Image: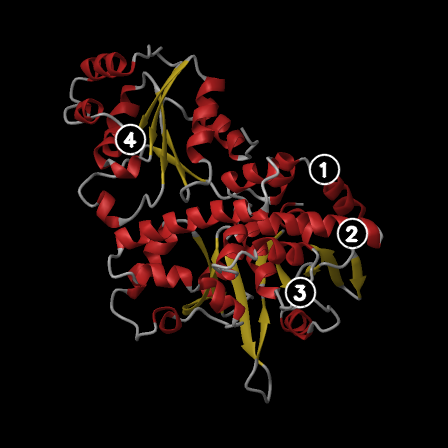
Amino acid sequence: MFKRKLYQDLLLWKNKYAGKRAVLIEGARRVGKSTLAYNFAINEYKSHIIIDFANTSKNILELFEDIHDLDIFFIRLQAETGVTLYQRDSVIIFDEVQLFPKARQAIKYLVKDGRYDYIETGSLISIKKNVKDIVIPSEEIKLQMNPMDYEEFCDAVGFDYNIIKKIYELNKPIGDLTNRKLIRDFRIYIAVGGMPQAVEAFIQKKNFQEIDNIKRGIIELYKDDLRKIDPSGRLARIYESIPSQLAAKRNKFSLKSATKTSKTSKDDERIFDLLDSKIVNICYNTTNASISLSQAIDSKKMKLYLSDTGLFVTMLFNSDNNDHEDIYKKLLSNKLELNLGYLYENVVSQLIVANGRKLYYHTWPKDGSSHNYEIDFLIIKNKKVIPIEVKSGKIKSHDSIDTFSKKYSNIVGNKYLISAKDVGKENDLLLKPFYLIERIICG
């Protein structure tokens, strides 16, 4: 099993809340929810039962038709599974619980009974049609599981992340050779992504065509899910359009460009459905950085990023040609004949979200020009606004972040320009390489 940071959150739940509240692990399909729940059960309990609602028997499903007598319920459950349950030392896992709403509704009564602990895992868990006829249990703690962040990726593939922590603490240039090596490692993360299946294939020394095929399979799985939610196919087209819209350097997501038709009355609901699927991350445009970022959102202006940059790469270079290896080699050596700023934006967005933060950006008009200034990302840290600008190439021009810092001088903390360049400083602008982004967010 890959080491996942969410394991510690599960331990906190078990030690503090188990027996009083269930825990629901939310996240996109294939991010490792079931594996995490299974390994946690193995390590932390005397016995466990896993009910996979995507593949379980009719007899198990029928148990939830009548739960008024829980003594009988538990006896039948143990008989059907062949597993002995131990009071306060067993856990029951409801895997893909969104597929069987009655089980999720039963959580209220099972938790109140208090004999055993309960872990739920779910994808597309809050889609209305899956929960419209049930009482949503309040006895749940929700944990969000994302694709592997860079620290988790390094731990999985054998890169030494402690070096990155030391570089951040040292806050001095490390030299071109070392920096180039660490940037190349980070580009491997961009290319492979954080989906456990793809990471496992990389560890097994699969070639990039095989890794790409795994990622294509996940993308098709996601699109199939979206078509089930929205048979018109419009939702799937919105999802597919995200890489090309970012590549076009738009300052907001365009539904018309995604669907090739005018906006419909259901499109706002489709966007919410897409967000509920956890396969995309939304970046809100905040109109005024001097107040709470969430209180100044322009609801008509947003960007969408893919939750996993490895999938982004596969969608971006979607081709039936057998040129996968060549594309990946060029990406890793930074020799693609493209400005890949949007690709680096996506990975920065992924790592911001993976570390528990929402995404915000800020635009405002340039005086006497039809163009806008734009700050790629804003976060709050130590009660200060931290602007982050992402550059894939030259870093000499940074008018937006300079102007922003003057505009909001009383509330701006550290300001960062993230690129492939070594650690440095230009006046009060901090220059940091991509591999330090998680330390910037968390450090």
Q: Answer left or right for 393 relative to 229.
A: right
Residue placed furthest toward the bottom: 368
Callout 2 secondary element? helix
Number of callouts in the render? 4
Q: Are marks 4 and 2 in contact (CB under 8 Å)?
A: no
Q: Where residue 406 sits: x, y (%)?
A: 67, 72
Q: CA distance from mark 1 to mark 3?
A: 25 Å
Q: Residue 438: where, in percent of width, then height? A: 64, 48
Upstream in sequence: badge 1 or badge 2: 1
Q: Secondary structure at mark 4?
A: loop
Q: Tag on residue 55?
A: 4
Q: Secondary structure at mark 1?
A: loop
Residue 132's tag is none
Question: Which mark is first along the chain, 3 or 1?
Answer: 1
Is residue 223 placed above or below 134 in the rendered structure?
A: below
Kindly report the distance in space between the C-alpha atoms of the residues bearing marks 4 and 2: 48 Å
Who's the residue at 38% across and 54% down the image? 275
- Name the kind of residue labelled 4 in the image: Asn
Mark before the other along the chain sequence, 1 or 4: 4
Q: CA distance from mark 1 to mark 4?
A: 39 Å
Q: Are marks 3 and 4 in contact (CB under 8 Å)?
A: no
Query: Dot 2, how many residues are within 10 Å of its Cα: few (below 14), some (14-19), or many (20+)?
Result: some
Residue at 56% x, 32% y is 2
- Badge 3 element: loop
Crowding at mark 1 (Cα within 10 Å: few <14, some 14-19, many 20+): few
Name the residue carrying label 2: 179
Q: Which mark is residue 160?
A: 1
Residue labelled with disc 3: 391
Q: Which one is earlier in the sequence, the residue at label 3 or at label 4?
A: 4
